[in-house]
Image (tube, grey):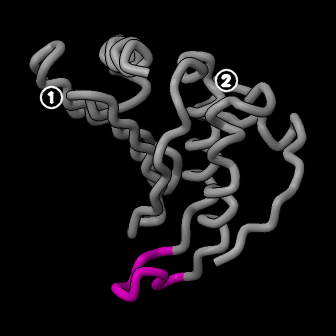
Amino acid sequence: MSVVSRDITTAERRHELSPGITWVGEGPGDPADAAEPRFVELERLEPDWDGYGAQSIDARALRGARAVLGHPAFRDLPAPEVFPLPSGGVQLEWAAGPLELELEVEPGGATAVFVCDEEGTHYRFDGVLPGDEQRLQLALARLAAHR
């Protein structure tokens, strides 16, 4: 599948993760811009893209994933791997050393977080955003340190 390259305007980088919380990507080199071509690919997926009845990717899930990457807390990280979910959601995934961070933005925009940090903090947890921001901040700091 080929990706059509296009300029992304500031208005297109502005996304609302939840009511009243808006983040904006800040230009070339940030994770939001680096992941944008993949988001465009996901927007084009048709129903049953996996051959097992997967849903098309939900527009609110895409907005939520873009919003996450536009947040200042993600500036020090490399662009994540971006995957479609059969439910119509979007998964963002980072791995560095012993640490794995996954964010799943579900259809409708709900965001789940999974962190596995066996070496550093010796824990795994599943959480949701908003709600588990402190644990997420710890994981982000550890990921940035492995960069």
| Disc 1 versus disc 2: nearer the observer | 1
Q: Quadrant of residue 68?
A: top right
The residue depicted at 16 percent of the width and 13 percent of the height is 121
**Position of residue 112 measured from the top left corner of the image (x, y, whole percent):** 35, 39
Q: Position of residue 70 (x, y in %)?
A: 65, 29
Q: Which residues are magenta?
A: 47-55
For mark 1, give the secondary structure. Answer: strand
| In this picture, residue 26 sits left or right of residue 67 | right
According to the image, label 2 marks what residue? 20
Residue 113 x/y as whole percent: 33, 35
Let me know if residue 63 appears in the view. Answer: yes
Q: Residue at x 20, y 31 (%)?
A: 116
**Which image quarter holds the N terminus?**
bottom right
Dot 1 amino acid type: Arg
Q: Is residue 95 above or below residue 85?
A: above
Q: Count neighbours of disc 1 (C-alpha within 10 A) and say few if under 14, some if 14 to 19, many if 20 or more.
A: few
How far is disc 1 from disc 2 in space, using C-alphas? 30 Å
Q: Name the amino acid, label 2.
A: Gly
Residue at which label 1 appears: 124
Q: Is residue 94 above or below residue 6?
A: above
- In this picture, residue 9 sits left or right of residue 102: right
Q: Main secondary structure of the magenta part?
A: loop
Question: In percent of the image, x 74 and y 27: which residue is there?
Answer: 24
Q: Nearer the viewer, residue 36 or 64?
A: 36
Q: Of helix, strand and loop, which one carries label 2? A: loop
Mark 1 or mark 2, which has the lower sequence index? Answer: 2
Which residue is located at x 39 percent, y 13 percent? 145
Q: Residues within 10 Å of mark 2 (few under 14, many from 20)?
A: few
Please provide percent x and percent y for residue 92: 45, 44
26 and 2: which one is in front? Answer: 2
